[in-house]
Amino acid sequence: MPSRRSAGRCLRENEPRLLQYRICKEPRVTDLLHLPISVSDLVAQALSRDLDRLVAIGQDGERLTARGLAEDISRIQQVFEGLESRPRRAAMLSRNRLEILAVNSALGFAGVVATALHPMGSVEDYLYVLEDAEVDLLIYDPGHYEPIAAALTERAPRLRHVFAMGGEGTGRNLTEAARDYTPRPLVAPAFAPDALMRIAYSGGTTGKPKGIMCSQGASATSALIQLMSWEWPNEIRHLICAPLSHSGAAVLTSVLVRGGHMVVVPGFEPVAVMQAIEEHRITSILLVPTMVLALIDHPRFGEFDLSSLEVVFYGASAFPAARLKDAIERMGPVFFQFYGQAEAPMSITVLRRDEHKVDDPERLASCGRPTPLVRVALMDDDMNEVPDGTPGEICVRGPLVNLGYLNKPEETAQAFAGGWLHTGDVAVRSADGYLRIVDRKKDMIVTGGFNVFAREVEDVLVEHPAVRQAAVIGVPDPKWGEAVKAVVVLEPGVEVDAEVLIAQVRERKGSVQAPKSVDFVEALPVTPLGKPDKKALRNRYA
């Protein structure tokens, strides 16, 4: 805990075990009595009880108890704290593995700001992040990334410490280094709510990825919303197949606090995921829509017993209503949607399981209603709230909102204009408060002076039984300015004429929304996070 003297000075960013307040310009009272809870507080509390209970199972059957995880966290924390030059910012590069649970938490307890390198990225991508985030500590999986770690060590001048998880190579063996320490009781550092906890990089679909500065307060708020607003099974056996470097780790705290355990698999592969659900009687899982579709469209889907699943948490990208209905009919009423973005993580709105009305396409297209700890408004370009039924940008206030963009003050000011986070998502609100996202603001097509929301056209296209996926973009056109173009993936072995699809949209939405052209492709390009990559499509058809 800080002394009165240390609490009254301007501290270094996230100085471990000291309370950070931004008092460099205006001194103010440091209120230790009412210090908000942090993610590390929640983890420490969860791992201090029922020490012999199971908390995680690894891909090779390794079993980790609450006591074992707490001891691993403590040992690794001490490794980081014992380095000659104390690391400030860390990056992790790894496929899913059990050790990540302890390493991620240890970074938090050591007061090191963490960022993740996407496991499907390139060396150049990683070098950009390491430089932008001023990373001085790299932790990696030597079984898959040894050559990349060697290249990064050689080319990233800021790196001072490199550790390999469970092996030796370019980096020091973190597992062996941790054995030199005796576990201590976990004590969460005292952080101010606006202290930097993590830097999350966007997918880079609009240029170089932006580093979103995630605060201690927003991360704790996200966990608290999950605990109060998400529908969890009574017995939580949660499968982690999404990248632990990104959304896969988002529910770690909630599962621990609720007394559940996790099963960690290396990544998403449809058959392996279905086998794990059957073998471990999994009750909850977090997926993005493309993963759900990969399961239900897989030819072996019917071979596995998935009846133990009580809830499928899904989000991160659009889920066409017609395909969501297919998923519900095949997997049951187990779907729970969360809507958020890195700037306000995971839970701006939620759509609960019983709110998925299969006979109501508008409800299935909804992202739900706002959660209790956020304020949400739909606004026009002049920052006026729009009435129900009128498209407006989703704007958010509250403790869920993060700090802005690293090294990008102008973009931060633009995103937070008027004292609101501008999400870039355009939605309409129903009379009973449900939001339905019609498009990303940047994806809106202006054709002949009319606005066309690509997502609405996509939803109509995928209603055709021959269509598996569709992406709609605007392409340059000398007559219309932009012309509506559909890029379509068909079901295997099925054909349909482009004019049939165009006519379907014209009948449902009108001639303005009807595509001027349709291209059929084997697959849509996707970002590393599994979202359709419209930037790549625009470049292809520009």
Image: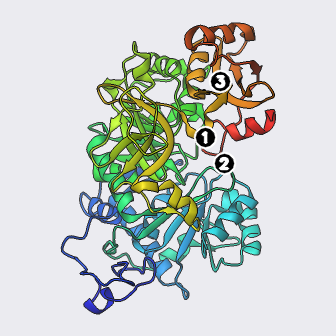
Is 13 above or below relative to 236? below
Name which residue lies at 33% across and 54% down. 398
> Dividing the image into 4 quarters, which one contains the N terminus?
bottom left
Q: Nearer the viewer, residue 312 or 342?
A: 342
Q: Which residue is mark 2?
A: 206
Among the two numbered marks 1 and 2 on one chain, the one whose residue lies closer to the N terminus: 2
- What is the x, y in percent for residue 373? 29, 49
Residue positioned most to the bottom: 5
Q: Specify few, some or many for label 1: CA neighbours under 10 Å numbering under 14, 14-19, or 20 or more.
A: few
- What is the x, y in percent for residue 21? 35, 78
Among the two numbered marks 3 and 2 on one chain, the one whose residue lies closer to the N terminus: 2
- What is the x, y in percent for residue 484? 70, 24
Residue positioned most to the left: 33
Is 195 above or below relative to 537? below
Q: Which mark is residue 442?
A: 1
- What is the x, y in percent for residue 468? 63, 19
Secondary structure state at the residue bearing disc 2:
loop
Among the two numbered marks 3 and 1 on one chain, the one whose residue lies closer to the N terminus: 1
Q: Nearer the viewer, residue 271 or 525?
A: 525
- Drawn side of residue 139 relative to residue 281, left or right: right
The image quadrant that residue 297 belongs to is: top right
Q: Specify few, some or many for label 3: CA neighbours under 10 Å numbering under 14, 14-19, or 20 or more.
A: many
- In this rendering, the label closer to the viewer, 3 or 1: 1
Q: CA distance from mark 1 to mark 2?
A: 9 Å
- In this rendering, the label closer to the viewer, 1 or 2: 1
Given the image, on which type of amino acid does mark 1 rest? Lys
Q: Label 2 near label 1: C-beta < 8 Å?
A: yes
Q: Nearer the viewer, residue 317 or 155?
A: 317
Given the image, on which type of amino acid does mark 2 rest? Thr
Q: Which residue is mark 3?
A: 470
